[in-house]
Image (tube, rainbow, N blue to C red):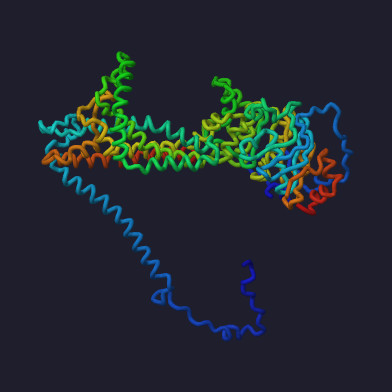
Amino acid sequence: MGGAGFPRPAPPSQNRGTVTQTLDPAPPSPLVGGPRPPGFAVDRAFRVLAVLAGLFVLVVLVSIVFVLFDSAREWISFEGLGSLFSLDWEPVNEKFGAGSLALMTLIVAALALVIAVPISVGIALFVTEIAPRRARLPIVFVIDLLAAIPSVVFGLWMLRQLSQPLADVYADVHGAVAGVPVLGDLLGSPSASGLSIMTAAIVVGIMITPIVTAITREVFATCPLAQKEASLALGATRWEMIRGAIFPHSRSGVVAAVIIGFGRAVGETIAVALVIGASQRLTGNLLAPGDTLASIIANQFGEASGVQRSALIGFGLVLLLLTIIIGIVARSVLRRANRRFGVV
Amino acid sequence: MTSEPAMPPAATAGDTITRVDLTPTQVRPPEVPADPGPVPGREVVFDLSTVEIFYGEARAVTDVDLDIARNEISAFIGPSGCGKTTVLRSLNRMHDLTPGARVAGTITYHGEDLYGPKVDAAEVRRRIGMVFQKPNPFPKSIFDNIAYGPRINGVRKRSELEGIVEQALTRAALWGEVKEKLKSSALSLSGGQAQRLCIARALAVDPDVLLMDEPCSALDPIATARIEDLMEELKETLTIVIVTHNMQQAARVSDRTAFYTAEADDNGRRVGKLVEYDATATIFTKPSDPRTEGYITGRFG
């Protein structure tokens, strides 16, 4: 447009006294109470809708907490606040502690991360830095497809295909490390069925790999070319460039990916329920069966009644709080990293 | 362009201007001693002959023949799209990173074929450092930025690294400003400081050549003057090739100047080519090609 449509200044009037008369502007309409422009109603409707949508989430969250808490009250008053997290889960003896299940939940999730994070970072680096341009999209597509597989399918696949072969592997591993301090205990005598904490961690690890990969891939891809060139111009090899430019740039993003993966792993239910072996006694032996907060709900809720049922609902509440805490920790980690270096 | 003010900029507190003579007379001084021509015994670092650079099928630059001598500052000037940066980046094999980019012709470095089959690009870049248009410090501490190069070269001892860092920062005229805050993030530095940090980072691996791709285009005139002073000092120990959009900068700092331009080829595509390469005084006072004269007197480009 430029200045073309701009009104030219009127030629200076010869008689200044008549100017106001010839222009004679209509009095401006009042700011309040005048006619509304046509977009006004739509804008207002949109605002109401947006606020309602926002409120909806809040209402759902509050009602979840309220309902869970209400149903779990029986368990909380039965156990008393002090022993809610006791390590004993023995419904027959009226012991409903959440402690051992919460700990095993964390163990499974942590172990799943140990499996998933190196694989995810490797895939992400391969896709962003090493794979030929044409191969990148198909690889990404296949990995994203993995995320679309329903949890129960993963569980069944693990149960039918891998738990027995894994049992043999576990036996060998146990034989190899027997007697070694710490390792010998961690990889203790395996369950004959192959159903164990380790098996659950493997399946959860596979399941969280796509999301962790997707986030790390995006973080790696945002590393500015200038950073990579700075590194390479100093004589860095490709790996040195990855370590020197991409990792520092991506540090907090990868931490976020790890924490999001952790959150998913903690809540994973049906696949874990199928392969973990359902033993509620806390064990440090990763090759033995266990149970998690989520999987015990899936496995026992149908037959539970009374305090036990109330306790299982309470576990749901614990799970919810756990994931919220993880989310808060994730945010604070990110904020701290941002403060230090000002990068994502 | 920020580095071509009409008047010398006022000095602000804390800045010392050792030399700001940005007057246009610099471009065409009244009397210039005749170009001494190539000095006998001039040691050639780079020798480019019939160099052509392609991006995929498209030819970006053609017909580049020039040699760059040791302890000289060579400036590449020319209008946008003339291929001067493309040629610069071929000197430390940065094009290896661009899919489809290809260098034809021969480029030798101290007599060795830079693109020879046994030459390792990382090793090339350890000897031929580069400073980029936009300062690009790593999101790390100042110390770790400088120590990055030595570390990938296997220097592990803290005391040794500290020595290298101090020396590199001193050579880049930044030590006094940052010695108290080596542990703070390099991203907290000003634009001019960040660019000197990047120069220091390049110097820390003790390169033989420093390639500078419009190193001052993002800087104010004071920071520009400091970098130019620095180049003058570094020339004693290094060979410098600088790409610049600023002709006056080329006139001020360089010993030799290469003028590139872009011309349409038979298919109508614009291809960069080297027009003239000579002693800077010659290029700016009596260029032999009318295109060079047209550019430096501002008639085109």
Locate residue A308 relative to residue B47 in the image: left or right: left
Q: Quadrant of residue B219?
A: top right
Residue A29 position within the rendered picture, expressed as x and y whole percent measured from the top left = 45, 78
How many discs appear?
0
- Judging depth in this view, the residue of A91 and A199 nearest the camera is A199
Above or below, A313 against B44 in this view is below
- Judging depth in this view, the residue of A258 and A171 nearest the camera is A171
Locate residue B207 relative to residue A248 in the image: left or right: right
Residue A148 position within the rendered picture, expressed as x and y whole percent measured from the top left = 37, 44
Q: Quadrant of residue B84?
A: top right
- Judging depth in this view, the residue of A116 and A275 nearest the camera is A275
Locate residue A206 relative to residue B265 in the image: left or right: left
- Quadrant where the N terminus of chain A sits is bottom right
Q: Quadrant of residue B209?
A: top right
Residue B292 position within the rendered picture, expressed as x and y whole percent measured from the top left = 81, 47
Locate residue A143 relative to residue A62 in the image: left or right: right
Residue furthest to the top in view is A179
Residue A299 position within the rendered picture, expressed as x and y whole percent measured from the top left = 20, 37
Above or below, B274 against B48 in this view is below
Above or below, B148 against B27 in this view is above
Residue shown at 41% from the left, 74% from the top = A36
For the question of whether residue B288 can be seen, the reply is yes
Residue shown at 76% from the left, 36% from the top = B74
For the question of whether residue B180 can be seen, the reply is no
